[in-house]
Image (spheres, helix red, strand yellow):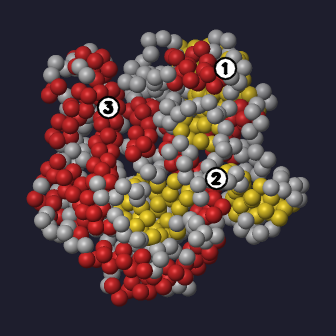
């Protein structure tokens, strides 16, 4: 059988009469839907009481899917508590940042440190695996759903203290890491430690903390606490099913959880992509590349996207004709091996009744959305044998570090207006629009495959990272760092040396002072004949071997370096000392990429995104995606065949893309 890209999405047939299921499956067949995610929020259905399990509905759902030749991604259903559980074991309800114990309601409503939650969730996962582990329709396990949220209850406080003992070993080590001689905080007993909440170390919300070390460790602890819930369910599944892959759906660049700590425990990465529809296309692309980077470049699943509109925002615009197709091909171009939707049929009630669906409330097959989904299903039907398992041969890396994200944004000063994800996106966007494929990777990754390493706002420098970055430059590569990088160690303690700490030899600079201004204060930066602007933070750089590339044009530091380049070994270390606007970042990044011949052949067409994947058999695929509402007219840079049209194009021939058009070129 020809391998196929899994295509489908969340299916909740328990929400409507069973006589509608026949029509559902007829429509699924018409749309090319072959994969269904079921049971995501079914705990109260499958376990109506602690000592009662009822799999009647799930039995029929899975059996019917298998009879229709569809695979099932089966969820454990443990993301939202059933009411009886919260009533019987009230400690499972979370305590919020303000110290209030919640009552039953919402979803993501469980305390990850609750023994009752852990016991009952793993028992349910185990029973599901025992019943369905060898079901012919089972394709993958989907544990929980979009893990997130934080709890500050006494159970979490006790678990946090245990986590701290394991991490730091002694109170002396903990006091040193947290720098508790400040404000008379030195702890003499583990029981004195409280979670950092609005009642303890914070004011004006979770991002304003007096002790960054405590808050940083609590972020790490909560990541591990929720991860422990996932691994417990996975272990319960593995008792009965050793082979079916297990995943959970992530949310891209999601601040509360460090997905790099989760990645080793997943059989494959998956995520839900819901970018604001007015965001540039590099925003979802960054999410895709981050997910691909979780498993050392292995393909991921696009577990959810909307076929038309979301429902959770103040304003929820509709995807225009062609945008769904373009977004799906973009995901595949960046490494997706599955394309799934939320949701298959629109919910009749509650908060998602307005959320887009493949099938609306009326169950019609003649809507624009259904026709677009069906047409895309036809395109994907024969593409799996070409793309499944394909990888991206990138020579450019962007370092993504949750610890630096947390530490930067919980710090007091120099500016709370600096947002980690926004700065990373400007550098990612510059590289992608220059035509470079980019791996978004953790700071622990092996850097030897890369010629260019982009490390914006790398606030914390941990372990041997500085030495490994030096090794990139020493062998001829280029490393780029920015303002507010290399300020602190893994505990967010400032380095007792000149800024930028351990990166100073590589970058060849010293920073003694930094200025911060409101967002509307804009400074010119001159780079030869090119002038751009900067804002937010202005570091005052003293070269210590580095060559000035750009200089400030205003204030008392006018004429001092804003951008520098330092020769190091056979390579270079670049430093950008301020928050340049997008054209300024584009200018710098293109200079760095050009040194390594990494500017793509279509870089002048900024609306045309390119991405490369190489299949296991060596087939090289070049994806061209036109994000403009006007046609794009290109010149083919190589001989290739467009797999979507069958048309062959010779090198140097005209190559046109329709508005929001896609071409997948098999390079010959």
Question: In this rendering, which labeled residue sits more in front, label 2 or label 1?
Answer: 2
Report x, y in % for residue 450: 64, 33
Q: Front-most of 231 and 242? A: 242
For label 2, the SS is loop
* Disc number for residue 616: 2
Q: CA distance from mark 2 to mark 1?
A: 32 Å
Q: Residue furthest left?
A: 88
Residue that numbered label 3 is attached to = 217
In the picture, measured across the screen, residue 303 lies left or right of residue 113, that is right
Q: Front-most of 513 and 235? A: 235
Report x, y in % for residue 147: 35, 52
- Could one spot residue 184 in this view of the protein? yes
- Could one spot residue 587 in this view of the protein? no
Q: CA distance from mark 3 to mark 2?
A: 41 Å
Tell me if mark 1 has few (under 14), some (14-19) or many (20+) residues whose alpha carbon lies within 10 angstroms of its own.
some
Residue that numbered label 1 is attached to = 474
> Could you say which quadrant of the image residue 24 lies in?
bottom left
Tell me if mark 3 has few (under 14), some (14-19) or many (20+) residues whose alpha carbon lies within 10 angstroms of its own.
many
Question: In this rendering, which labeled residue sits more in front, label 1 or label 3?
Answer: 1
For label 3, the SS is helix
Q: Is residue 622 above or below residue 469?
A: below
């Amino acid at each position: 059988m020809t391998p196929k890209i899994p295509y489908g999405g969340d299916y909740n047939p328990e929400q409507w009469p069973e006589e509608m299921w026949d029509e559902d499956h007829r429509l699924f067949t018409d749309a090319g839907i072959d994969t269904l995610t079921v049971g995501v929020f079914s705990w109260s259905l499958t376990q109506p009481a602690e000592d009662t399990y009822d799999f009647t509905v799930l039995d029929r759902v899975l059996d019917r899917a298998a009879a229709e030749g569809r695979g099932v991604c089966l969820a454990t259903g443990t993301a939202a508590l059933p009411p009886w559980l919260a009533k019987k074991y009230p400690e499972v309800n979370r305590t919020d940042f303000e110290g209030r114990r919640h009552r039953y309601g919402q979803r993501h409503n469980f305390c990850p440190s609750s023994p009752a939650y852990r016991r009952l969730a793993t028992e349910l996962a185990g029973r599901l695996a025992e019943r369905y582990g060898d079901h012919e329709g089972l394709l993958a396990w989907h544990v929980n759903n979009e893990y997130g949220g934080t709890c500050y209850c006494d159970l979490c406080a006790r678990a946090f203290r245990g986590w701290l003992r394991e991490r730091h070993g002694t109170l002396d080590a903990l006091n040193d890491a947290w720098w508790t001689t400040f404000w008379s905080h030195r702890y003499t007993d583990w029981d004195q430690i409280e979670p950092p909440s609005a009642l303890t170390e914070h004011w004006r919300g979770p991002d304003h903390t007096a002790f960054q070390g405590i808050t940083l460790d609590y972020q790490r602890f909560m990541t591990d606490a929720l991860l422990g819930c996932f691994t417990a369910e996975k272990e319960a599944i593995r008792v009965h099913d050793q082979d079916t892959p297990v995943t959970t759906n992530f949310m891209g660049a999601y601040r509360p959880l460090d997905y790099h700590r989760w990645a080793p425990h997943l059989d494959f990465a998956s995520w839900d992509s819901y970018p604001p529809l007015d965001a540039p296309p590099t925003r979802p692309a960054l999410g895709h590349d981050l997910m691909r980077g979780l498993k050392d470049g292995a393909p991921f699943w696009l577990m959810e996207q909307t076929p038309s509109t979301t429902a959770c925002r103040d304003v929820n615009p509709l995807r225009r004709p062609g945008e769904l197709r373009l977004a799906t091909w973009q995901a595949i171009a960046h490494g997706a091996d599955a394309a799934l939707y939320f949701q298959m049929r629109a919910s009749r009630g509650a908060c998602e009744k307005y959320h887009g669906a493949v099938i609306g409330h009326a169950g019609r097959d003649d809507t624009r959305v259904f026709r677009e989904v069906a047409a895309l299903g036809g395109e994907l039907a024969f593409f799996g044998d070409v793309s499944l398992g394909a990888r991206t041969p990138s020579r450019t890396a962007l370092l993504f570090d949750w610890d630096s994200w947390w530490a930067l944004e919980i710090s007091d000063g120099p500016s709370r207006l600096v947002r980690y994800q926004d700065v990373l996106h400007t550098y990612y966007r510059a590289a992608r629009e220059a035509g470079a494929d980019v791996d978004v990777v953790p700071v622990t990754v092996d850097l030897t495959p890369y010629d260019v390493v982009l490390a914006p706002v790398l606030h914390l420098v941990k372990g041997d990272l500085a030495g490994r970055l030096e090794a990139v430059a020493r062998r001829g590569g280029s490393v780029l760092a920015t303002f507010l990088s290399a300020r602190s160690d893994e505990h967010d303690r400032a380095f007792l040396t000149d800024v930028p700490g351990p990166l100073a030899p590589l970058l060849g600079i010293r920073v003694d002072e930094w200025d911060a201004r409101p967002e509307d204060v804009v400074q010119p930066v001159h780079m030869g004949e090119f002038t751009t602007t900067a804002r937010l933070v202005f570091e005052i750089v003293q070269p210590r071997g580095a060559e000035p590339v750009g200089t400030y044009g205003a204030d008392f530091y006018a004429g001092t370096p804003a951008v520098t380049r330092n020769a190091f070994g056979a390579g270079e270390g670049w430093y950008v000392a301020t928050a340049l606007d997008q054209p300024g970042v584009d200018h710098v990044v293109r200079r760095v990429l050009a040194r390594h011949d990494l500017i793509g052949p279509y870089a002048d067409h900024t609306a045309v995104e390119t991405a490369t994947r190489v299949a296991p058999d060596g087939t090289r695929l070049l994806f061209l995606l036109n994000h403009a509402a006007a046609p794009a007219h290109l010149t083919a840079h190589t001989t290739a065949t467009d797999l979507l049209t069958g048309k062959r194009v010779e090198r140097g021939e005209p190559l046109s893309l329709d508005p929001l058009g896609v071409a997948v070129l098999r390079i010959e």
